[in-house]
């Protein structure tokens, strides 16, 4: 289990930001922003990719109840196809930040690129979800909220198995696309099926 830093700049009110779903073939990209009080205990908190489904679901209410503020934002499939997935991820982060009930003084953003949010400076931190508590908490909220959205989409389109694959390019998901074709929730700007011979 990683030992996560409590803050980057102790004198500033920081919000960690992360997204989920960039590599998916279907569904929205979802982001979260989280401001944690320094004293809040979140046993087992880590990068959401390193946690089990049960671990993420256990942490979600602890984060939502204990955070000074948290917000979730998303960008739709239509927005992803129109402005590309990277810009859509930044848009989702901006929407998550805008929904915070407390304005942070600094943004800690997972990754190496970000479109500046007006009025709030930011630091990009590669693999930040494994280094800072607030980013790890944001990664958990982004992942769990997106999984919830994909489970809801699954009820309308069960043949694609989104309750299991969450829209990622798994073999079963691609087999369903090959058999049925894409639907309105698929990202047409992505390569849904590999080219023949690949």
Image: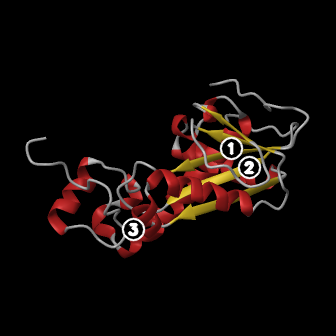
Q: What mark, if any, has residue 34 been given in the picture?
A: 2
Determine crowd level at label 2: few under 14, some 14-19, many 20+ residues with C-alpha closer than 10 A.
many
Q: Of discs 2 and 3, which sits in the foreground?
A: 2
The quadrant of the picture occupied by the C terminus is top left
Q: How far apart are marks 1 and 3 (CA)?
A: 26 Å
Q: In this view, does 108 lie above or below 65?
A: above
Q: Residue at x 88, y 39 (%)?
A: 12
Q: What mark, if any, has residue 154 been given in the picture?
A: 3
Determine crowd level at label 3: few under 14, some 14-19, many 20+ residues with C-alpha closer than 10 A.
some
Determine crowd level at label 1: few under 14, some 14-19, many 20+ residues with C-alpha closer than 10 A.
many
Secondary element at tag 2: strand
Q: What mark, if any, has residue 137 been given in the picture?
A: 1
Q: In this view, does 11 lie above or below 182?
A: above
Q: Where is residue 50 in the image (x, y as percent from the top left)?
A: 53, 34
Question: Is residue 21 visible in the rendered structure shown here?
Answer: no
Q: Where is residue 79 in the image (x, y as percent from the top left)?
A: 47, 66
Marks 2 and 3 close (CB-CB < 8 Å): no
Marks 2 and 1 close (CB-CB < 8 Å): yes
Q: In this view, does 180 lie above or below 91?
A: below
Q: Which residue is drawn at 33% across and 69% down?
A: 158
Nearer-N-terminus badge (2/1): 2
Q: Position of residue 16 (x, y in %)?
A: 71, 43
Q: In this view, does 102 lie above or below 50?
A: below
Q: Nearer the viewer, residue 50 or 35?
A: 35
Q: Which residue is drawn at 41% across and 55% down?
A: 166
Q: Distance between the residues labelled 2 and 3?
A: 28 Å
Q: Where is residue 21 in the image (x, y as percent from the top left)?
A: 47, 52
Q: Which of 31 and 118 is in front in this view?
A: 118
């Amino acid at each position: 289990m990683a030992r996560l830093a409590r803050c980057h700049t102790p004198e500033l009110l920081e919000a960690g930001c992360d997204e989920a779903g960039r590599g998916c073939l279907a569904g929205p990209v979802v982001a979260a922003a989280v401001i944690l009080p320094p004293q809040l205990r979140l046993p087992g908190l880590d990068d959401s990719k390193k946690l089990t489904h049960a671990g993420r679901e256990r942490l979600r209410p602890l984060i939502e109840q204990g955070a000074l503020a948290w917000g979730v934002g998303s960008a739709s499939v239509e927005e992803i196809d129109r402005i590309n997935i990277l810009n859509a991820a930044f848009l989702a982060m901006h929407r998550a930040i805008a929904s915070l009930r407390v304005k942070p003084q600094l943004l800690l953003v997972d990754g190496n690129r970000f479109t500046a949010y007006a009025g709030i400076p930011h630091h990009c931190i590669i693999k930040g979800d494994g280094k800072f508590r607030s980013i790890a908490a944001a990664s958990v909220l982004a992942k769990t909220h997106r999984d919830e959205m994909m489970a809801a989409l699954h009820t309308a389109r069960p043949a694609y198995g989104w309750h299991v694959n969450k829209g990622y390019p798994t073999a079963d998901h691609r087999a369903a696309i090959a058999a049925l074709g894409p639907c309105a929730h698929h990202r047409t700007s992505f390569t849904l099926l590999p080219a023949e011979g690949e």
